[in-house]
Amino acid sequence: MTDHATEQPAPAELVLEQISKTYGQNRAIGDISATIPAGKVSVIVGPSGAGKTTLLRIITGLEEATSGRVLFDGEVVNGVPEGLAMVFQDYSRSLFPWMRVEDNVAFPLRRRASKAERTRRVAEALQAVGLDGKGRLYPWQMSGGMQQRVAIARALACQPRLLVMDEPYASVDAQTRAELEDLLLSIQAQLDITVLVVTHDIDESVYLADRIIVLSKPPSTVTEVIDVGLARPRDQITTKEEAEFVHARAHVLRLLRGTATPDDASDVRVA
Amino acid sequence: MTSMTHDESTAMPRARLPHRVGPLLKTGAIRLIVPMLLVFLWWLGSRSETNGLFIAPPLEVAQRVISDFLSSDPRHFFLGDVARGDLVPSLWRATLGFWLAVVVGVGLGIALGLQPVLAALFQPLVHLGRSLPTPALIGVFFLLFGTGDWPKVLLIAFGIVWPILFNTIDGVQSIGTARAHVASVFKISSWDVLTRIVLPGAAPKIFAGVRVALSLSLILMIISELQRSKNGLGNLLVSNQRNFDYPGFWSVLVALALIGIVLNVLLVQIERRVLAWHRGVTLQHD
Ligand SMILES: Nc1ncnc2c1ncn2[C@@H]1O[C@H](COP(=O)(O)OP(=O)(O)OP(=O)(O)O)[C@@H](O)[C@H]1O
Ligand SMILES: [Mg+2]
């Protein structure tokens, strides 16, 4: 992984400026402004229907905002930015079952890298997610957790500066989810990339995040931005026992229920 | 067309069968029981007083198949007179019509499948074409395209293009927006989207359509030769019947059945290779 890390481009910073999105009469996103700092893990949490998926589609340039703009390293996003890769929620629909794992991972690199370069990057990416030697399998020969690792490997093979994930672990069991959370954190630390995750899971948001962006009900706005100071590397058991973890989790939960008061935030630094 | 996505006989896991039945099925012994029963009934029929005149006995028909369709001459690729004079022209036209329909059906189906607006516009036309009684149109095809091979080829193509077209549209639309998002986020080139996402993704449905089209093409091949034809198995059927050559008539039917079986086996083998992934996915989700 070491030579991979050296050629990894610098992580990107993402700025959301007064984004709104209206579908017909339906105001999905009211007004969202936030900064996703470079080289950190940011997590978006919010009630169902708050427009999280919509926001990611706007960030990835798949959809246009009704108003506002997204800056990717200072440049206005207009189409899918170079250096952005994504892991989708539903691995069974985001991977291509007619391709072997190695071809799935290499697919975005076609016409962008030489054959030798592709082979090398695929091997590195599979190794990074703990799937070395599994390249010849088909996705449907793997468990759900392994398939989501393939999806992560495919994103990593693109050497992204920003990795975006929409509820990446929603369809795997709790044990696998914990493993994949730790995998994500170790990859992020090694490769030094910016990571933006959407999740429903409050524990997961606190465990992963340097910064949590809490959204309100639609038309959504940013309820609060919480910077989490928990030490890294984090640990599924000890980190979750820490007072700051427990307080942050309770605070996020209250924010989502709409019963938070400023005092609840005494243990977390509010940005 | 029904949107059957795969052939039950290939997709069903063998493991579900009781252990002793599995090997028996594999040797094909069980599959032979029904055909053997049919031949027996045929033989009974040929001995009946009333129908025996028209039903030639199986053994005699088998001899006719061999003498008409096979020869010992390597210069003729071991093909008998009837095979060269009628079978080859028939199959040639059917093959041409079949591939024409595959190219047009898949090409048009992908275009329509990718463009919901176009698909909506053409939907009524496709339904109309599908429900047209193709055999009844044969006169029109002779009128439009003369009397040579073309009216027959085009009739076959026209008759069988609909299941392919229908299934291709269906198959393309079944690929889903999630995969389209993957393609955009990873900036996959249009050519790769077409050849590596759309075509393989729609392939299971396309094959279902092609399977239906294949058997239809044999039927239409015969129908197109029943009138105004100088050669072909259809023409032979009619002329043998007119000449009261019932063993000859039955030998054509047997040859047709054999061709149907061979083509189907071929298709199943190709499908097995091309759609191995699809069987895997289906088995996993069962
Ligand atoms: N393509 C679309 N056309 C019309 N309305 C849409 C579209 N996509 C999303 N919406 C609407 O926008 C709102 C936000 O949807 P979105 O999927 O972004 O929410 P979400 O926060 O991701 O929800 P969940 O947590 O359930 O995934 C919803 O009211 C939804 O109905
Ligand atoms: Mg969503």
Image (spheres, rainbow, N blue to C red):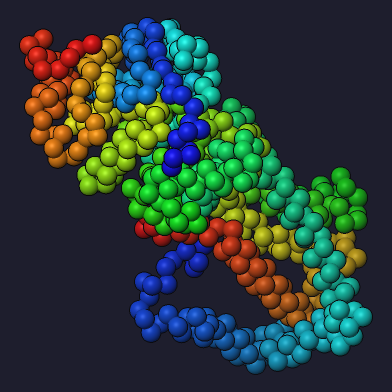
Picture coordinates of residue B189, whole percent (x, y): 63, 34
Depicted B85 relative to depicted A26: above or below: below
- Quick check: can you spot residue A153? no
- Up-down relation of residue A73 to residue B100 (above or below): above
Residue A192 lies in quadrant: top left
At horizontal 19% and vertical 38% (from top left) the residue drawn is: A235
Q: Is residue A16 visible?
A: yes
* Image location (x, y in percent) of residue A162: 43, 26
Residue A214 vertical placement versus A243 (above, below): above
Residue B232 quadrant: bottom right
Residue B76 drawn at (x, y percent): 90, 79
Against B10, is B73 above or below?
below
- Say whether residue A226 is left or right of residue B55: left
Q: Which residue is at the front of the view, A122 or B223?
A: A122
- Seen from the viewer's position, the closer of residues A211 and B272 is A211
Which residue does the image show at 76% across and 50% down from the upper left? Answer: B100
Picture coordinates of residue A213 (x, y %)?
27, 18
Q: Is residue A242 left or right of residue A106?
A: left
Q: Report the label total.
A: 0
Q: Is residue A26 left or right of residue B87?
A: left
Quadrant for the C terminus of chain A, please. Answer: top left
User: Position of A20 compared to B165: left or right?
Assistant: left
At horizontal 42% and vertical 48% (from top left) the residue drawn is A127
Q: Residue at x 44, y 21 (%)?
A: A12
The picture quadrant where one finds residue B214 is: bottom right
Near-viewer residue (B202 or B123): B202
Q: Nearer the viewer, residue A212 or A66?
A: A212
Locate the N terminus of chain A by quadrant.
top left
